[in-house]
Image (cartoon, rainbow, N blue to C red):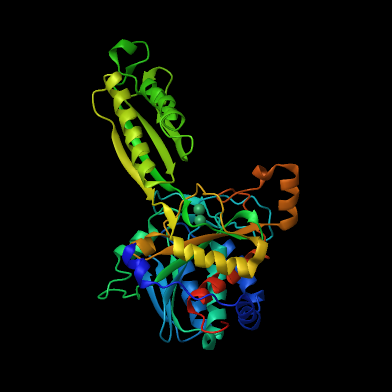
Amino acid sequence: MAAATLSLSSPSPRSSSWISSILDQHRPALGPYEELYRHLHQHGELSTQEKETAALMASQLRKISDSFDIRTGIGGHGLVAILDNGPGTTILLRADMDALPVQEKTGLEYASTKRMRDDTDGLEKPVMHACGHDFHMTALLAAAETLVSARTAWSGRIVFLFQPAEERGSGAQAMVDDGLYDAGRHACPIPDVVLGQHVLPLRAGTTATRAGSLMSAADSFRITIYGRGGHGSMPHRTIDPVVVASHVVVRLQTIVAREVPPSETAVVTVGALQAGSAENVIPDEAVLKINIRTVSALWRDRVLAAVQRIVRAECLAANCPRDPSFEPTSSFPLTVNHAAVAHSINDAFTAYFGDAHDPNVPNALGSEDFGILATAVDRPYCFWFFGGVDQVAFDEAVARGDEATIPVNHSPFFAPVLQPTLTTGINALVVAALTYLGTGGR
Ligand SMILES: [Zn+2]
Ligand SMILES: [Zn+2]
């Protein structure tokens, strides 16, 4: 990050009233964007299959302005729209586009009934924007319209980036690998700073971020334990992978309980344990699907090593005929906000949102691949959250002490209220952009 720190001087503080007046004058009427949100919500697409969504983003951008330089089909369905507005800093604002294979149960009048074939396994599945990426896209488009309208008030360059396949942790890397920033390929200008946001089950109207570690790394593996199958009546002639896997599951719990310091945060979850199909047959292998969350590079390495050590040791203890296999299924990096950028964003958000901004939100154990868009070109980044829970419902839940019952991202009941969630997402993007690009209000 050293080079990045040098290349990006801290922005001069803009006056919050100046930013407010820009938003008041230039933020478009939101009726059409609320309509767009409901459309996106009902037409989600699974990761890597965001074809219609990406086409809609491009057509909406063209509708906003003909001065966008739009490049599509990056790393799958990724796209960027570049707005060159004179000398100055280049910033990148990112939204993700994919939905999840979840059957919506919110009961909203605009609930999704969409189904589509999942290209990874050929099965038809329900599709729901259960992670709120529909808010991210809608807010980014409305922020783009605001910033286009206000272009005499700022100078510099903005890359509006729409990313596919966030849920698989593969979309940001796919865009980079496809030459997002390569001169001979998509030649997207390398940003001085990368900014992005996520809607979470916080009180609607609020924003939150922090300097340093914000979201965990997430590493998932498919582990196969090889035994020797046989008749249920003759266990002595077999090596039972069900017993080995059971020991592994229990022993893995000791990593967090007995190896990771209580002051550190880590989660080891065995999300699936699959072996055998009949009462009287000892199967010849067992499969474990494991998800590991960590919030520091040191403990990420140590926890991953501990999982491998324990699985190998249990297989050795059981005299398994083969070493277990470890197949990585997804990997999300740590999200660590650059200190100086987070400081600037915190100052700007506190000035604009007041007490509704939390500048030191606790580390979230969700994960993101957003940071790859910055680290791939050694640039600093800041990611923040905005709330989506109805304010009255949120306050009542807090008063009852049962916030845990509020549906979270990925739940079939996840239902952020349309407003003030959408307006907050738009305002946050515009405030962040003008913090780096504004030329007035000093
Ligand atoms: Zn998600
Ligand atoms: Zn998400």
Q: Nearer the viewer, residue 326 or 52?
A: 326
For residue 28, side relative to residue 286 (left or right) = right
Q: Nearer the viewer, residue 98 or 21?
A: 21
The residue positioned 46% from the left and 51% from the top of the image is 367
> Residue 420, image x and y in percent?
68, 65
Q: Can you say whether 414 is above or below 284 in the image?
A: below
> Residue 247, image x and y in percent?
40, 22
Q: Residue 84 is drawn in which quadrant?
A: bottom left
Q: Residue 312 is drawn in which quadrant?
A: top left
Q: Can you say whether 270 is above or below 37 in the image?
A: above
The residue positioned 59% from the left and 71% from the top of the image is 426
Please state, as top left, top right, bottom left or bottom right, where the C terminus lies in the image.
bottom right
Q: Nearer the viewer, residue 242 or 27?
A: 27
The residue positioned 37% from the left and 49% from the top of the image is 331
> Residue 184, image x and y in percent?
25, 75
> Residue 251, image x and y in percent?
41, 25
For residue 133, side relative to residue 35 (left or right) = left
